[in-house]
Image (spheres, helix red, strand yellow):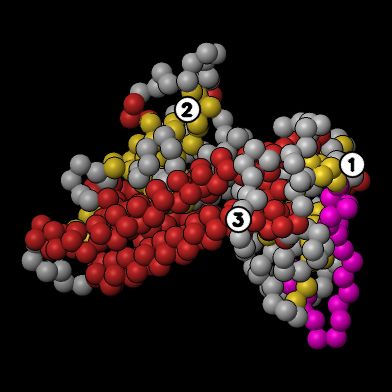
Amino acid sequence: MIEVNNIPEGWEETTLNDITLVNPRESLSKGAIAINVPMDCIDSFSKKIKRYNSKKFGGGTKFRNGDTLLARITPCLENGKTAFVDILNENEIGFGSTEYLVFREIKDKSDKHFIYYLSISPRFREIAIKAMNGTSGRQRVQTDMLVNHKFNLPKYLEQKSIGCILSAFDNKIELLQAQNKTLEATAQTIFTEWFGKDSINTVLPDGWSVGKLSDIADFLNGLALQKYPPIDGQESLPVIKIKELKQGITSNTDRANKTLDKKYIIKNGDVLFSWSGSLEVVIWQHDIGALNQHLFKVTSQKYPKWFYYHWLLFHLNEFKSIAATKATTMGHINRNHLDLAEVIIPNNETLKKLNNLFSPLLDKLEINNTQIQTLNKTRNKLLPRLMSGEIRLHEFKV
């Protein structure tokens, strides 16, 4: 979105330099602790930072809680590596790559949450990308060009209202994600108690048996979807690759036409297993997409989803170890490893009892995932409208 001359009532034309401290200077005072936060601690399109502890101060860009970190180098900027710092304690100073830009609020002039949401808004990212310079492989945002660009922005109180509204969405999403981690950990703990590795080497109850992963589930490998390019004027599908397992569908996700067999269509709730590169097992929690090569869609006509999903998780570290030994640029496993991975299959009566225990946990997980996606979509639709002044928050109380 290009800036226009029509400034919403009560807003003003201003620059980041006027309302924020850009790359503020920091010094390690006595007793302060330096926390190293490398670029890979910021997930794409995620507000949260993965904490990385280090007391060895290595220089680089410095920041404190409440600051916004913006990756200024390709492809990190395009991939949405922007974060709000909330992982530090009072006596800690973060430091990381010099490829971060740091924005800090100025008291009574700007709101820290608003600054973060401004930095991930479509119009801001468009301007940041235009401010890039350098070779095609290593372009960087020209800091002066970005921070001196004139934006139409609300005044402090409305900024605070906008930040509060959008933070409420992210706080709810974070709460649901934390709940999901607890549900997954609980289910996997119970599963391991019932089907732990030692059980395979002990005498099994009557009607129980030892089988293989390939006995309890079907593993459908994806297609080389570059052979199915989008068709002009027709609807297309997002191509689900390994990176989409981690960050979902984004504006950078490739597209494919819809002529492929329906069995290669991924839907919300499908179990996906990346067998090459970064081995991951996930329950897909996004919109429909097309299954790319290097991914299995895992299904079963005989056994419930929780059963083969948790057996995959049970063997995941083993598969990762196998992939790490492959003398290739991209470690992987093959179908033979699925045939060798042992599982315990209970009798029908026990499977029904366990289904009553595990299915509600998985159902709750999927309900939470659906709610997370709804909140994400609502926030993403609301964000540009709040940032443009299309929706105003004059009466909102914080």
- Residue 397 placement (x, y as % from top left): 61, 60
Which element is circle 3 on? Answer: loop
Looking at marks 1 and 3 on the same chain, the residue that comes earlier in the sequence is marked by: 1
Nearer to us of marks 1 and 3 is 3
Q: CA distance from mark 1 to mark 2?
A: 37 Å
Can you say which quadrant of the picture contains the C terminus?
Answer: bottom right
* Mark 2 surroundings within 10 Å by alpha-carbon count, few (fewer than 14), some (14 through 19), many (20 or more): many
Nearer to us of marks 2 and 3 is 3
Residue stretch in magenta: 15-38
Type of residue at label 3? Phe
Q: Establish if 214 lies above or below 109.
A: above
Task: Tell me if residue 21 is in the magenta stretch.
Answer: yes
Where residue 237 is drawn, which disc sits there? 2
Identify the residue position indicated by label 1 in the image. 145
User: In the shown orientation, is residue 151 left or right of residue 45?
Assistant: right
Identify the residue position indicated by label 3 in the image. 396
- Residue 105 placement (x, y as % from top left): 79, 61
Query: Is mark 2 in CB contact (under 8 Å) with mark 3?
Result: no
Type of residue at label 2? Leu
* Mark 3 surroundings within 10 Å by alpha-carbon count, few (fewer than 14), some (14 through 19), many (20 or more): few
Which element is circle 1 on? Answer: helix
Residue 342 visible to an observer of this rendering = no
